[in-house]
Image: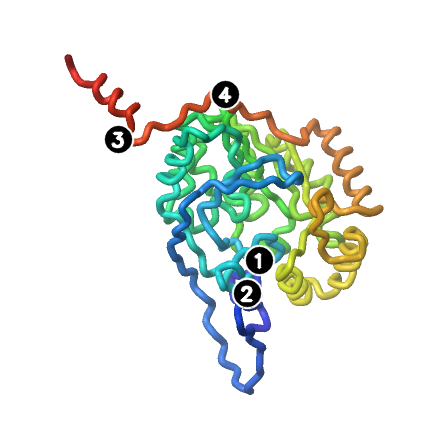
């Protein structure tokens, strides 16, 4: 176990999966052999479906698509880290370095959308892990998915902290013209130094603001998600961050209080000890005061916002700033009435189409 995160990584911990029959403990044998920074490895995800459904009352969508498992951005606070434990991998370094992807995601999506029982509703793209993380530049799965959604006139919402989304502005602008697309750019802080250690492989804050401007100028409804809001670390930035978002064309805004489910707590606490030791005790104390005495509160209705006087103050400050700037709480409602199921090769519909294309 390395005492500090390898260069470009967010976690120094290699916590073992809680589902394994064994666990490792660090041991100092006296040798000071610095291990090289771990490279990113890719494996194929053989999931038979690509759309995931949920019944959570805390989020404004009931279905999502995640073309990747794990995320190279390496955010120390990422709530999705514990999902790697299901794969027998570490929610720490493995989450950032051992990724899996769905090479047939677009084809699988096309089959699911073509099913007679499918009923259209907005799909959230890249919620558990960022659909525009660095590996997307190489694999292009997210763009293939967007093409399928564009062809079917299917509404989609996206959350990202990557400037790579600008590559797909052509598709997003086309969807947006029919109220079929909305983007939220996640901006945690405007402090470059803080962002560099907290989100080591994500775009710089100033670059994310440029992405907001590029999307807005292309006619794509775009908002900013101030997430996570971390007491005593970035909570003083609420107003200045929203000012910057509005100045760059954002039309909506939201926020989420820091969540520390399962293995995320020791990973984040280690990050605090390494990068903000003078604030560590204060951060965790205020977080517990906002989580009814716990570091994490998983209950529906509480996990995203928390409770208590500090949380009430956050909401008041956020709401006042949004009203002053004309920022809505949600983006423009997306239109599900334009959906046209895709025609799969070999189906009756495509046979009729092929017959109709032949000269008489």
Residue 74 placement: quadrant = bottom right
- In space, the residues marked 1 and 4 are separated at their CA atoms by 37 Å
- Residue 278 percent coordinates (x, y): 75, 64
CB contact under 8 Å: marks 1 and 4: no
Labelled disc at residue 19? 2
Nearer to me, 224 or 145: 145
Judge the density around disc 3: few (<14), some (14-19), many (≥20) Cα neighbours within 10 Å. few
User: What colour scheme governs how the chains and residues are painted in the rendered image of this protein?
Assistant: rainbow
Labelled disc at residue 337? 4
Labelled disc at residue 82? 1
The number of discs equals 4
Residue beneath the point at 65% across and 45% down? 227
- In space, the residues marked 2 and 4 are separated at their CA atoms by 43 Å
Position of residue 208 in the picture relative to residue 288 (left or right) = left
Check the picture and name the quadrant holding the N terminus. bottom right
Nearer to me, 233 or 305: 305
CB contact under 8 Å: marks 1 and 2: no
Q: Reading the chain from its start, which is encountered first: label 3 or label 4?
A: 4
Q: Residue furthest right?
A: 309
Q: Secondary structure at mark 4?
A: loop
Q: Secondary structure at mark 3?
A: loop
Nearer to me, 193 or 133: 133
């Amino acid at each position: 176990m390395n005492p500090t995160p390898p260069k470009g990584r967010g976690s120094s911990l290699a916590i073992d999966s809680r589902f394994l029959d064994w666990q490792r403990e660090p041991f100092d044998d006296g040798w000071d052999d610095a291990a090289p920074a771990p490279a990113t490895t890719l494996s194929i995800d053989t999931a038979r479906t690509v759309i995931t459904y949920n019944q959570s009352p805390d989020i404004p969508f009931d279905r999502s698509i995640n073309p990747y498992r794990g995320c190279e951005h390496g955010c120390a606070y990422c709530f999705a880290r514990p999902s790697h434990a299901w794969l027998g991998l570490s929610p720490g370094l493995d989450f950032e370095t051992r990724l899996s992807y769905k090479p047939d995601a677009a084809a699988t999506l096309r089959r699911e959308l073509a099913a007679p029982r499918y009923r259209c509703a907005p799909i959230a793209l890249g919620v558990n892990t960022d659909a525009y993380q660095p590996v997307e530049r190489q694999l292009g799965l997210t763009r293939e998915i967007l093409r399928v959604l564009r062809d079917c006139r299917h509404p989609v919402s996206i959350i990202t902290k990557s400037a790579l989304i600008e590559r797909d502005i052509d598709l997003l602008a086309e969807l947006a013209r029919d109220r079929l697309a909305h983007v939220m750019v996640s901006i945690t802080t405007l402090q470059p130094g803080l962002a560099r250690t907290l989100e080591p492989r994500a775009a710089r804050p100033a670059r994310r603001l440029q992405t907001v401007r590029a999307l807005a100028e292309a006619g794509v409804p775009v908002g900013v998600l101030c997430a996570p809001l971390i007491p005593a670390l970035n909570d003083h930035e609420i107003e200045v961050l929203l000012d910057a978002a509005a100045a760059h064309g954002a039309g909506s805004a939201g926020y989420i209080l820091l969540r520390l489910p399962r293995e995320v707590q020791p990973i984040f606490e280690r990050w605090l000890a390494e990068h903000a030791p003078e604030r560590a005790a204060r951060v965790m104390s205020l977080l517990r005061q906002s989580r009814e005495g716990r570091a994490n509160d998983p209950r529906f209705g509480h996990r995203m916002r928390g409770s208590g006087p500090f949380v009430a103050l956050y909401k008041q400050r956020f709401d006042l700033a949004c009203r002053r700037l004309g920022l809505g709480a949600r983006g423009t409602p997306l239109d599900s009435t334009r959906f046209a199921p895709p025609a799969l090769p070999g189906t009756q519909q495509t046979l009729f189409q092929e017959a109709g294309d032949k000269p008489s």
